[in-house]
Amino acid sequence: MNRIAAAVAGLSLAFVGTSETFAATYNVPADYATIQAAIDVASDGDSILVAPGTYTSPNNGIIQSNGKAISILATGAADQTFINARGNGSGIRCLSGEGSDTVIQGFTIIGSNQSGIRCVNSSPTINDCIIMNNTAGEGGAVYCRNSSPTLNGCTINSNTALSGGAFWCQDSSNVTLNECTITNNSANLGGAFYCVNASIVTSENCTISRNSANNRGGGFFCQKSSGPVLKNCVMEFNSSSDEGGAFYCFKSSTSILTDCNISNNVAESAGGIFGPATLLNSTISFNTAYDGSGGGLSCPEGQLLITNCTISNNTASESGGAIYSLSNTPTITGSTICGNQAVQISGSWTDNGGNTVSMLCEGVGGACCTDNQTTCITAIEDDCDVFGGVFMGNGTQCEDVSCPTICIGDANGDHIVDVNDILDTIDHFGTTCP
């Protein structure tokens, strides 16, 4: 009997031990009326399943995960399940050391006035959420302080803040974004992202578009050893009223971009990128500096490292249609630079000596005789026409050609005086020349 009793006791202890491994599931509102009530009773490893509906404050629109490694999962689509703070604070708060095993998935988070999601000393995982129409002084959608959240498949749309319309990151925060869309967010500094104090945003396969800054950094504003690390991302149609349509980085901060497309961004100066940058296999095109220098890139200090990139069709109202670099000459390897426009010379950068340097498409461009064919610059053929010059042929160099002198009677500039010059003069008879 003693051996039987011992065996029964052992089995009982075994079941007691294994019962802790069985995760519980709580249903809202079937089991608990509010999401927070379910969180309060949940333990690590448990799941909370939230039915479609609108969960609002004061009872259900502000959720605090309390440091628990739990999954809070919407059972319907994100646009069917709303967490609405109605202006009473942050929709979701992770403030107690949450790790990546704290998972929030499938919600639309709206109506917050202190960031849609607030992370302090935490690193939750956010999947397939829509974070929209939230406001804050710092980080309209997501606030991060000493935090490293991961967002997968999220849409961050139409949030506003004084700094960081979508994200505000400080104190060595490391935000990871995968296959996210960040669009139509706005702020004074950093329309989409504001990063400070060694904070890094690592983004892969994301689209960051139509964000705006009233001051600097339509897409990113980064300072104090912070910056974005982007791979296979699209940065387009972002805008700044000052510098950096897509990126503004300074004070030891830099942009690191691989396989990215930076296009159609606009700013007063530095239409695409302001500050140091490392670019690999990327395209920088159709960006505009509407009242300054650096249509594609502007780097007043620090270094530009450009490898296997295409920089084309950017525009600056002053210098450097492609690149404006004052401190160090850019290091450019295996890249194509052409079709850029600036007041000085199209397709150029301005270097630290104030000189304008022309870069051309591979196999395209050459000597262009301007100023009544007495001065030679290097340009592509279309740009030479804009300057009213005579293009001397692809691959020609100014030092190797002699610009033709003015030929009296050669009205159409074809270096031949014939009946076509008479016809050209008749066509232009009465024109007032500058």
Image (spheres, rainbow, N blue to C red):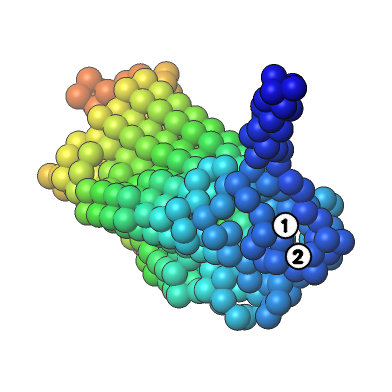
Residue 317 located left or right of residue 198: right
Toward the viewer: 238 or 195? 195
Residue 21 position, x and y percent, is 66, 36
Crowd band around label 1 with a 10 angstrom C-alpha radius: few (<14), some (14–19), many (20+): many
Crowd band around label 2 with a 10 angstrom C-alpha radius: few (<14), some (14–19), many (20+): many
At label 1, which amino acid type do we have?
A: Phe
* Contact flag, marks 2 and 1 (Cβ < 8 Å): yes
SS of the residue at dot 1? loop
Q: Quadrant of residue 381?
A: top left
Residue shown at 83% from the left, 61% from the top: 31
Quadrant, the C terminus: bottom left
Q: Which mark is residue 107?
A: 1
Residue shown at 71% from the left, 77% from the top: 59
Q: Which mark is residue 9?
A: none
Q: Which mark is residue 82?
A: 2
Residue 36 position, x and y percent, is 67, 66
At label 2, which amino acid type do we have?
A: Phe
Q: Quadrant of residue 338?
A: top left
Looking at the image, tell me whether mark 2 or mark 1 is earlier in sequence order.
2
Toward the viewer: 313 or 234? 234
